[in-house]
Amino acid sequence: MTDDGTFTTTTTTTGAAGPTGPTEPCDAPDRSDWTTRERTPGTPPRVIVVGAGVAGLSTGCYAQMSGARTRVFEKHVLPGGCCTAWSREGYLFDYCIEWLIGTAPGNDAHQVWAELGALDGKSVTNFELFNKVEDADGRSVTFYNDPDRLEAHLLDISPADAPLIRAFTRDLRRFTDIELYPFLTAPALRTVRERARTLRTVLPAFRLFWRTAATPMHVFADRFEDPLLRKAFRNIFFQDPGGFPLLPYLFNMAAAHHGNAGFPQGGSLGLARSIEERYRSLGGTVTYRARAERILVEDGRAIGIELRGGKRYFADHVVSACDGHTTVYGLLGGRYTGPRIDKLYTDLLHRPGTLFPAVVSAFVGLRGDLDPGEAHSTTHLLGPDDADHLPGALQDSLVVQARSRYSGGFAPPGCSVLHCTYFSDYAHWKDLRTRNRKEYRRRKREVADFVRDFLERRTPGIADRIEMVEVATPATTHRYTGNLGGSILAWKAFSDADDVAARLVGKDRMRLPGLSGFSMAGQWVGMGGLIRAASTGRFAVQYLCRELGLEFRAWESKGDEPWHPGKLGHLPQLDRWSAREGEGS
C-alpha cells in the first residue's frame, strides 16, 4: 500500500491463479440493464452496494440468496476494506484480524460465517492465552483463557489480591456457559420465539450481565494492590480501549476458551476473498476501481449511483456499506438527516472517546523462526524514555504480535513476521502529511527505528535478522478505506454512540429520514467488529426484502476446497522507491 492510500500497479501472486468470476473494472462493458433507469420487465429487483468490505459483500451475498440481482462497487482493487493485507518481497502483512468471533460451530455467529463461506476449507488457530502484558522491568501477566489456569497464575503473582482475582475468574467461568450471539435476525424483525430464546439466556444471568456491564474495567483494575495487575487488566485487549466495562473482556475470553475466537487460515484478506468467492458463486458482480461520487435521488427515493467520471448505474435499492460520514454528507450531501444521525455525526463524532482509536502498524519481516515459547501477543508497558520516543502515541505501550504463528503463508520459508502496533492520534499524522510530507516520512522512519531498537533490546541479535520494517499510519488507513479519523472499528462500543446506533439498526431499520430505497450497512451503523459488520449485511437484506417483496433466504455454503494461498489472488506490493526507503504504507 502506498502512502496516498492506493496500491501500486506492481503485483505479486501467492500461488495459483487468483480468484476468477464476475469481477471487473469500472470501464468494463455493461452486460445488463444497470445503466438504464428502468429495469428489464420480468427480471428480479436490482440492488447496488457501495463498498466491498465485509459488510458490503455480506449484503451482496444475502441479497443474491434472496432473489435480487446485485452489483458491488469498490473504489480500490481488493475486497475487505480494513480487513485486508498487502505484500512485499514475499512477506504478507495481515492488517486486521486479531481474533474472530464465530470460529467454532454451534452458534449464530458461526452460522453467519458458514452462510458467507468465510471459513470454507480453512483451519483455525486457537491460542491458550488471550494476551500477555509485560512491564518495563520484565514482570509479566499472562491472561490464559482457561479460568482455572488464569486464577492460579494471578494468585502466584499477587496473593494479596486473591478476592478480586477469584471474583474475576468466577465471572469468567459463568460466561463460558453462556451462548448469546444475536446475529441472525434484525432487531425489529425478531419473532416471539426468538425473543423468548434470548430471554431464556439473559434472565438467569441478568445480574451478571448488569453488574459486569456497569463496572468499568479501569475502576475494577484500580482496586488491585499489585501495580502490575492494575495496569495489566486494562490491556487484556492489547491496549486500553478506555471506557470499556468488564463484560466484553469476559465475553471474549470465554469465547476464546471454547475456540470460538480463533484466527482463520488466510487471515484478513483470506476472509474477505472467501466471502467474495461466495458472492461471485451466487451470481454477484464486483466492480473495482469504481469510486461512488453521489447517490442519485429522485422524488425522495434512491435510484442509483454516479461514479467519478460521471457514469451512472441504476437500481431498485441502494445500500451504502462505506464510511458513515462520507455516506451522509458526501454521497447524499447532508440532505437526509434526523435526530439520531445528527446526534452521531454532529455531536458524538467530535466528542473525545466516542470513536475507536486509530493505530500505527509496524510490520517486521525477519529471517529465522520466532521463539515458540513466547506468547503470540504481548503488550509491552513502556518506561518514560521509550514512551517519549513513540511518535503520536496515545498510550505508553507497544503491542508485539508474532503474526507468522497465526497462519501459514505470512512469511517466506525460513522467515517470520512481527506486527507491532499502538494507539495513535490521527490528527498528528494527518497534519504532518498535509503540512510537510518530508517530515511525515521522517516520523515514520522514527517508528521503524524505535521498533528495531526496542526488539533488539528485548531479544539481542534480532536486529541483524530484520529484513524490513513496514509502517502504516492512521493517515494511510483513512486514505485507503475512507474511515473517518483513520478508525478501524468506527464507533467505540459502550460509548454514548452505542445506544444511538442500536436504535438506528432497530427502530430506524438502517434507513435515513425522508429517503426510501436506501439502507446503510457496516460498522458505522452496527458498531465495530467483523461479525457485527457481516450481520448488518444480513439485517439490511432482511429489511429490504420487505420493501421489494422478496422472501429472505439464506443457506450455508458448500465450498469444501482446501484453502491455499493462491486464493488470495494478485496482491498489491510497494513500489521500488518505497521499498528502498523503507517507508511504505
Image (cartoon, rainbow, N blue to C red):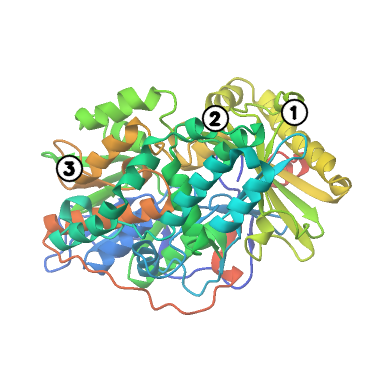
Query: Depth check: 355 or 301 in front?
Result: 355
Circle number at residue 507? 3
Q: Position of residue 463 (x, y in %)?
A: 85, 45
Secondary structure, mark 1, is helix
Amino acid at circle 1: Asp
Alpha carbon separation for disc pair 1 and 3: 48 Å
Secondary structure, mark 3, is loop
Residue at image point 61% right, 34% down: 231
Name the quadrant containing residue 305: top left
- Report which residue position mark 2 lands on: 222
Query: Depth check: 454 or 541 in front?
Result: 454
Q: Earlier in the sequence, mark 3 or mark 2?
A: 2
Q: Position of residue 161 (x, y in %)?
A: 59, 39
Q: Earlier in the sequence, mark 1 or mark 2?
A: 2
Amino acid at circle 2: Asp
- Characterize the local packing of mark 1: few (<14), some (14-19) or many (20 or more) Cα atoms within 10 angstroms: some
Alpha carbon separation for disc pair 1 and 2: 24 Å
- Report which residue position mark 1 lands on: 386
Closer to the eye: label 3 or 2: 2
Amino acid at circle 3: Lys
Q: Position of residue 373 (x, y in %)?
A: 75, 58
Residue at image point 66% right, 41% down: 158
Residue at image point 26% right, 35% down: 332
- Characterize the local packing of mark 3: few (<14), some (14-19) or many (20 or more) Cα atoms within 10 angstroms: few
Query: Depth check: 161 or 304 in front?
Result: 161
Give the farthest residue toward the top: 435
Query: Depth check: 112 or 474 in front?
Result: 112
Position of the C terminus by quadrant = top right
